[in-house]
Amino acid sequence: MRRFAIGDRVTVRDATTLFHHRTQSYTRGRTGVVVDHRPEWLIPEDEAWQREDGRVEPFYVVRFNQIDLWPDYTGLELDTLESEFAEGWLVPAEGGRR
Amino acid sequence: MSTTHDHDHAPIEAAGEISEFDVLETAIRGLAIEKGLFSPEDHRRFMEWAQRIGPHGGSRLVARAWLDPGFKQRLLADGTETSKEIGIDWLDPTGTGTPSDFTYFYVLENTPKVHNLIVCTLCSCYPRPVLGQAPEWYKTPHYRRRAVRWPREVLAEFGLHLAADVEVRVHDSNQKSRFMVMPMRPEGTEGWTEDQLAAIVTRDTMIGVALPRADWTADRSPVATSR
Amino acid sequence: MHSPSGLDTLQRRVLGLAPQPADRLDSPYWISNESYQALRHVLHDVGGQPDASVPYLDKDEADWELRTYVLCEVLAWRGVWNSEVRRRAENDLGATLYFGLPYYGRWITAAAKTLVDKGLISVSELAARIDAVRARREAGS
């Protein structure tokens, strides 16, 4: 059972990372909306060490407003950015579902 | 964007030198085969596939989508499966997909309200089965740093300026999904065949740094020169 | 004075004359948590870092680059490593090599290091083979 539905507002956790990850630092602590589901697959933190017994998690496409990602975004307010996250990297945004 | 070569760029490789990278590749390949890590047949098969791929695959997908609404719908719903209709199987050449490209392919449709731009800030993920190898600039830390944060500036540097009511949507390809942009069909192409349309769908229009034009069939980046 | 492109050339040379930092890193006795955090930053995570504009140049693919790509993919196909191991191995090379090597130079160096780290090839046999291949090439040209 997936934790997040399309339309849910989610925040990317600001967990410590070292040696390898695929959760960009510019997304940490940022809030966006789930816009699509991706299949489940081995998380990159385990795949990078060939841990075939590693964690398999559902992945999500999260869309952010660019003005929420950058302190001084020079583009337009309607601009967005999408990227993909393992379920373990996401928590429900403060204020719950939209 | 100027099409002249930038002669102030540092030389890429000194002419006439045997590249140490070349030597290293040959050394590793020989040892790997001797130790049975893979077979010469494996190498040959993958090399053949690598030499077959190119932007022509993606161009065909876009051109057909422009002409056939049913195909377009299938392509947007399931890029991996629909690629087979033009002879591209994302499971090739290993039977389970390529190690770097995987099998989760999504086509992003440009509309009058949304312009898509693709980058992989963490490395250089690119939909090789439908586009071939990425352009060199796509793989640079430079593009990876700037495309996510200054997308309109980057597009302007490619000569592309979008209206204020067009959302620029950047896709940072950071996991196993692979993306390609389906640009909008330009004016002046009424009555064209699929082949004619495919010729104007260049690699750069499928990354999102250019828009197709009825009068242009080439990517416009100048090529870095070696001394 | 300067033509537009001449001025551009001059400006880039000026940018390149960065002064040497007074506090160069050479195994300090102590660093702050903030400094450690910066050092712990995973190298490939460059999205959003400030950077000046440079021309977007394309490049013809050299034969060794195509062979490097195929070699790395075939090693992954046959289970020696996978593409995420390769990406981590590229980060593990450290900043000087990550940013000092060309793109496929990173790939081939990461492949060599991984094969040695896994004990599949010894570093001395690899070095010997490199010397032998180079000698053959030089004799042949």
Image (cartoon, coloured by chain):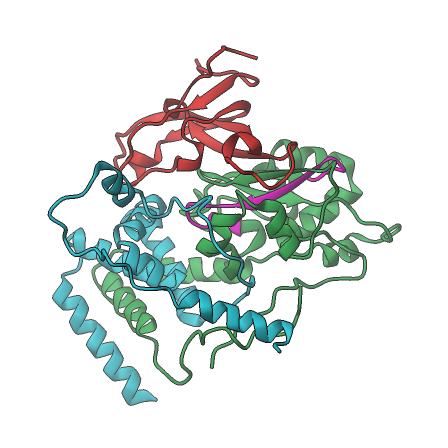
Chain colours: A red, B green, C cyan
Question: Which residue is at the far front?
Answer: C1
Q: Nearer the viewer, residue B9 or B208?
A: B9
**Residue A30 place in picture, x, y as percent:** 46, 27
Residue B38 visible at all: no
Magenta stretch: residue B120 in it?
A: yes
Q: Nearer the viewer, residue A35 or B63?
A: A35
- Extent of the magenta region: B110-128
Horizontal side of B227 relative to C8 (left or right) equals left
Q: Chief secondary structure of the magenta span?
A: loop
Q: Quick check: B113 above or below C78?
A: above
User: Which residue lies at the image location 13% right of the left edge and 44% below the top edge?
Assistant: C30
Could you say which quadrant of the image residue C107 lies in?
bottom left
**Residue C44 place in picture, x, y as percent:** 37, 47
Q: Quadrant of the C terminus of chain A?
A: top right
Question: Which residue is at the far top?
Answer: A96
Q: Quick check: B175 above or below C53?
A: above
Horizontal side of B20 relative to B152 (left or right) equals left
Magenta stretch: residue B158 in it?
A: no
Q: Nearer the viewer, residue C132 or A76?
A: A76
Labels in figure, total: 0
**Residue C33 place in picture, x, y as percent:** 22, 36
**Residue C2 place in picture, x, y as percent:** 61, 76
Could you say which quadrant of the image residue C112 lies in?
bottom left
Q: Quadrant of the N terminus of chain A?
A: top left
Q: Nearer the viewer, residue B47 or B10?
A: B10
User: Which residue lies at the image location 28% right of the left edge and 59% below the top edge?
Assistant: C21
Residue B174 visible at all: yes
